[in-house]
Amino acid sequence: MQSNLKAVKDGLAREVAAATRILVAEKILDYSGHVTTRLPDDQGFLIQTGLDSRAELRPERLLVVDYEGNVLEGEGNPPAELALHVEMFRARPDIQSVLHCHMDLAIAFTMMKNVQLKPMRARAVRWESGIPTHPDPSHIKHADQAAALAKTLGPHHAVLMRAHGLTLVAESVPALLVDAVHFQENALAFMQVLQAGAEPMPLTEEELVQINRHEMREFHIGKLWNYYVSRAINGGIVPANWNLLD
C-alpha cells in the first residue's frame, strides 16, 4: 500500500512540474506563480519552493505541505502566497488543483471600468457561472486574506485579483493546464473585440446550454494534455522519461 501511495505521489509531482514548465512556455507563468495539487488520503498537497525556477522545476524539488501550512517533506521554503493555496483547498473540498498566476490579460480586465470578462469562446463554458473579481490587490500572504479570496471565488472556477492576477481551480493538474490555456484564449478574444472598437457579444445562456449538451470535458482534457506534453517533450521543455503520456 505504501509503495502505491508513493507511486501516486511521484506521478502527481511529475504532473505539477511538467504543467509548471509548460505554462511558462505558454507565457501564463513566469518568475512567479505556482501550481498545486492534493495528495491522496488527506496527506496534504504539493507545492514548489518560492525560489526554484518555474521554467526548470523538478518533481523531486516539490514540497509536501499540510492544510495548516506546515512543510511535511522537502527542502526549502514555500512561496509567500502559500496561504492562498491552503485556503482554497480548505474552502473547496471538491477541487484537486490550484493555479495562481499573473496573466497580463487577466489583470487588464480588473483595471477597466464597466467591463466584465465573460465567456466568449466555446471552451469558456467552464466559467459560465461567473468570473468574480477580488478587490484586494496585494500579495495574499496571510490566512485572512486568503480566506477572503476563497470567499470571492465561492462556487466558481476562476477568480480575478484586482491589479494582481488570477486563480483557477480544477479537478486535476491536466485539467488546470487546459483551463489556463482556454482562459487566456477567451480573455484574448474579448480584448480583440474591444480593441476593434466593437461591442463584445458574450455567449448567451441558450448558447452555453447548447455547448454543455455536447461537452466532453474528460476527453478534451486528455487530448490537450497529450498535445502540450508531447510538444514540450519534443521542444526539450519536459523530459520524456517523466512518463506523462497515455
Image: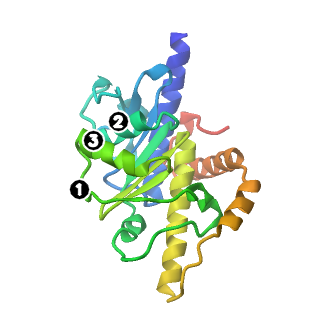
Kind of residue at badge 2? Val
Give the structural element (helix, strand or loop) at label 2.
Answer: helix
Residue at label 3? 79
Residue 116 falls left or right of residue 243: left
State how far apart marks 2 and 3 are (Cα): 12 Å
* Residue 144 % position (x, y): 25, 42
Kind of residue at badge 3? Pro
Task: Say which of 95 and 134 sits in front.
Answer: 134
Please state, as top left, top right, bottom left or bottom right, where the N terminus lies in the image: top right
State how far apart marks 1 and 3 are (Cα): 15 Å
> CB atoms at circles 2 and 3 under 8 Å apart?
no
Residue at label 1? 138
Residue at label 2? 86
Residue shown at the point (34%, 49%) measured from the top left? 149
Give the structural element (helix, strand or loop) at label 1.
Answer: loop
Task: Answer yes or no: is residue 52 visible.
Answer: no
Residue shown at the point (23%, 44%) measured from the top left? 141
* Residue 14 % position (x, y): 49, 35
> CB atoms at circles 1 and 3 under 8 Å apart?
no
Estimate how packed mark 2 is, as few (under 14), some (14 to 19) or many (20 or more) residues with alpha carbons within 10 Å: many
* Residue 225 % position (x, y): 61, 47
Residue shown at the point (59%, 61%) measured from the top left? 124
Q: Which of marks 2 and 3 is in front?
A: 2
